[in-house]
Image: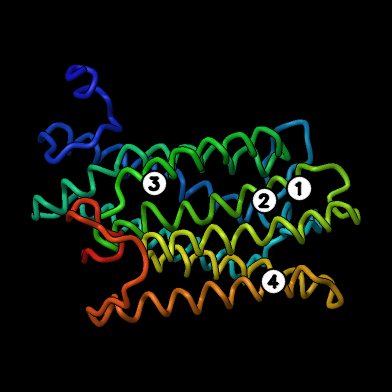
Amino acid sequence: MERVHNVNPFAKRDEHTKNTVITYKVLTTVTWLLSVVVSFYYTFNSPHDGNWARRRIWQQNDAYPTAFRLNSIIASIYWLVLFILQGGYIAHLFSGNVERVNAACSVGSHFILNNLFHFAFVMLFVRSAFGWAELIIILNFANLSSLYFRHPGYARFIHQAAVSGPLAWTFVAIYWNGAIMVPDANSLVARIFGNIFIWSIMVYGLFFIVVYKDYTMGFNLSVLSAAIGVSQFLRQVVAFQWIFAFTIMAVLFVATVVVAIPAATGKDFGFGRTQESDTERAPLLAES
């Protein structure tokens, strides 16, 4: 078992060897650049290969007026900020602080896999291979969920960039791409299901806010809910979906503020799960 643990890149370790750190520096940087480049390229360019409809990322989004269509400006800003934060996370790998380097390495394997999954998703999505793209999203959701629950206590700068930011997006993307994948996604039945499933975003966000006091998840999901709400409002003023989306955004934002203020001031209002050790504490209690 010890030998398996030593070769398992996802195993939890308190320290990492010099060669391991170098490997993480190289793979993390390369896969992140791959993720960034493909995202920017297909934001402004359509693919020139494939047998299906080939569109830019936001052309695909606008081509399918589903109940989970996103506002491209808000979603693009979300990803731009996330990429910048991830660049900061990668800088932790090059830090002279051993503790920061070990913390960054501990989430490195999942982060590398996330970058590869994101690359694959974009390549499939712009080529209208929505079924395969959905499979990639679900696999990445499992990867990031495992990362979250196995490493809940690192500094907020690492947590937001490598854990909660990608996880929040992946959860919403399951519905976003899944709705596009469904035939006749703009039908009355599909819209009704959309009106129901959108509430899972609020439930999911409140789970992390209440149980883990993780205000980054609440904020991330409130921004993505706003992206849905704005898109749905601009599409059809007389509809439930944008009202639900803005309601979810407001609830998550208020809950986020309620948790973030005591965390920032060093006070605790006494709700949420009690942690018994430093390695088990809530994600946002540690500073970068």
From the viewer's side, name the closer residue of 270 and 281. 270
In the figure, is residue 51 to the left or right of 39? right
Around disc 1, counting alpha carbons within 10 Å, would you say few (fewer than 14), some (14 to 19), or many (20 or more)? many
Describe the element under mark 4 as helix, strand or loop: helix
Name the quadrant of the N terminus. Answer: top left
Identify the residue at horizontal 50%, vertical 79% (top origin).
254
From the viewer's side, name the closer residue of 64 and 214. 214
Identify the residue at horizontal 54%, vertical 50% (top origin).
170
**Percent position (x, y) of residue 284?**
30, 65
Q: Tell which circle, 1 or 4, labels the residue nearer the N-terminal end.
A: 1
Which residue is labeled 1 in the image?
180
Q: Amino acid at mark 3?
A: Trp
Q: CA distance from mark 1 to mark 3?
A: 27 Å
Which residue is labeled 4 in the image?
229
On screen, 204 above or below 180?
A: below
Which residue is labeled 2 in the image?
175
Q: Tell which circle, 1 or 3, labels the residue nearer the N-terminal end.
A: 3
On screen, 5 above or below 196?
A: above
Around disc 4, counting alpha carbons within 10 Å, would you say few (fewer than 14), some (14 to 19), or many (20 or more)? many
Do residues under tags 1 and 4 come within 8 Å of each other at their CB atoms?
no
Do residues under tags 2 and 4 come within 8 Å of each other at their CB atoms?
no
Do residues under tags 2 and 3 come within 8 Å of each other at their CB atoms?
no
Around disc 2, counting alpha carbons within 10 Å, would you say few (fewer than 14), some (14 to 19), or many (20 or more)? many
Q: Amino acid at mark 4?
A: Gly
Corner quadrant of residue 271: bottom left
Name the quadrant of the C terminus. Answer: bottom left
Which residue is labeled 3 in the image?
32
